[in-house]
Image (cartoon, rainbow, N blue to C red):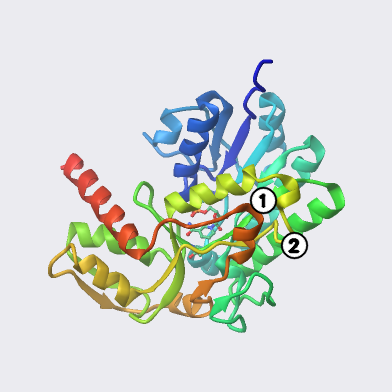
Amino acid sequence: MSEAPPPTVLVTGALGQIGTELVSALRDRYGNDSVIASDIREIDGHPIIKNGTFLTADVLDKEALEIIIDENNVDIIYHLAAILSATGEKNPELCERVNVGGLANVLELAREHGLRVFSPSSIAVFGPDCPNHAPQLTPLNPTTTYGETKVSGEVMARYYWEVHGVDVRGLRYPGLISWKAPAGGGTTDYAVEIFHHAVKTGKYSCFVGPDTRLPMMYMDDAIRATLELMDAPVDSISESRAGYNISGCSFSVTELVAEISKSIDQFECTYSPDIRQEYADSWPDSVDDSEARNDWGWNAEFELEQLVSEMLTNLTRTREVEE
Ligand code: NAD
Ligand code: AKB
């Protein structure tokens, strides 16, 4: 018997922090021709544009998305296009429009064309009334517009599953740490920027205070979680399908600095908290991911020590190549 052909996948927001790595992983798995990357912007020389099909598309333009879906017989959408917390709080109207309006277009197209969807949520769904170790099921009262859009996204996704049978799944990603692409306008960006500054100058001025502790995850774990969730049999997926908690590690800035300092002598971190401190303070310290573990076998691999080692090794190597 011949093997089934690979699905055709469309990734929106593909040039962002997650898309840069998720598109590569999907192309490794399904082949370059089966994965269409799209974004509202183009970046000259970006590996995702060089290595496969790339189309510019605004997720607010439903007709343009529909043409891409029709012309390419798309089966699955990984919908990453969004405005993150720090940029979103500066322009809440845009954040609402892109995050909620963009997802509405994707879900409606998925219903009309029988597609599966991955739609990321975030730890930003939680608010100050959530316990420090965030349970899967807890009242969701975020203080940021970004967080509200993520709660709306989970509600919309569940509705499309329950009412229209659209197989849409999502993860409440923690702050993601990676070295291949810059972080895109979020509150947790300090935990990425700190590595670039440590390698380049040995100094970093952090925009949240030393005791700030948040749930974080190395990108390799996040990509694996995404693929594992989408691979899981539909009957293993519970009512948390639109926003599974997943835990990687949890650390304070002081702990992160101490770990970096083990490799970079004299590394100096100073603190100049800004408005992003408030957003960080409204989010939990860590998350309980027992439901993801039980339903589809989730298990993180990267703790703080290994994460720091990977980041410093890779950033030092790419810096040496660039010089
Ligand atoms: P990012 O900001 O790095 O990338 C988002 C991409 O979306 C950008 O390339 C941007 O050009 C594109 N985009 C913005 N508006 C668009 C539009 N109207 N049409 C098409 N493309 C548009 O974000 P990311 O970190 O890759 O995040 C992807 C998803 O994961 C988002 O839903 C985000 O909320 C979620 N998430 C990310 C993190 C994290 O730490 N990176 C954590 C939790 C959740
Ligand atoms: C942000 O800080 O906005 C994102 C997120 C946690 O959703 N990294």
User: Is 280 displayed left or right of 107 in the figure?
Assistant: left
Q: Which residue is drawn at 39% across and 36% down?
A: 46
Q: Distance between the residues labelled 1 and 2?
A: 14 Å
Q: In this view, does 10 lie above or below 309?
A: above
- Choose the circle earlier in sequence order: 1 or 2: 1
Q: Mark 1 points at which residue?
A: 102
Q: Number of numbered discs present?
A: 2
Q: Is residue 94 visible?
A: no
Q: Name the residue under label 2.
A: 155
Q: Is mark 1 within 8 Å of ligand 1?
A: yes
Viewer-proximal residue among 100 and 115: 115
Q: Does the residue labelled 2 lie within 8 Å of ligand 1?
A: no
Residue 255 figure quarter: bottom left
Picture coordinates of residue 9, whole percent (x, y)? 61, 34
Q: Residue furthest bottom?
A: 129
Quadrant in which the C terminus is drawn: top left
Amino acid carrying label 1: it is Gly
Amino acid carrying label 2: it is Val
Viewer-proximal residue among 317 and 302: 302
Picture coordinates of residue 280, whole percent (x, y)? 47, 75
Tell me the mark number nearer the camera, choosing from 1 and 2.
Answer: 2
Picture coordinates of residue 144, whole percent (x, y)? 58, 73
Instruction: Indicate the secondary structure of the residue bearing disc 1.
Output: helix
Few, some or many C-alpha atoms within 10 Å of disc 2 (few <14, some 14-19, many ≥20)? Answer: few
Few, some or many C-alpha atoms within 10 Å of disc 1 (few <14, some 14-19, many ≥20)? Answer: many
Picture coordinates of residue 137, whole percent (x, y)? 69, 72
User: Is 8 displayed left or right of 258 in the figure?
Assistant: right
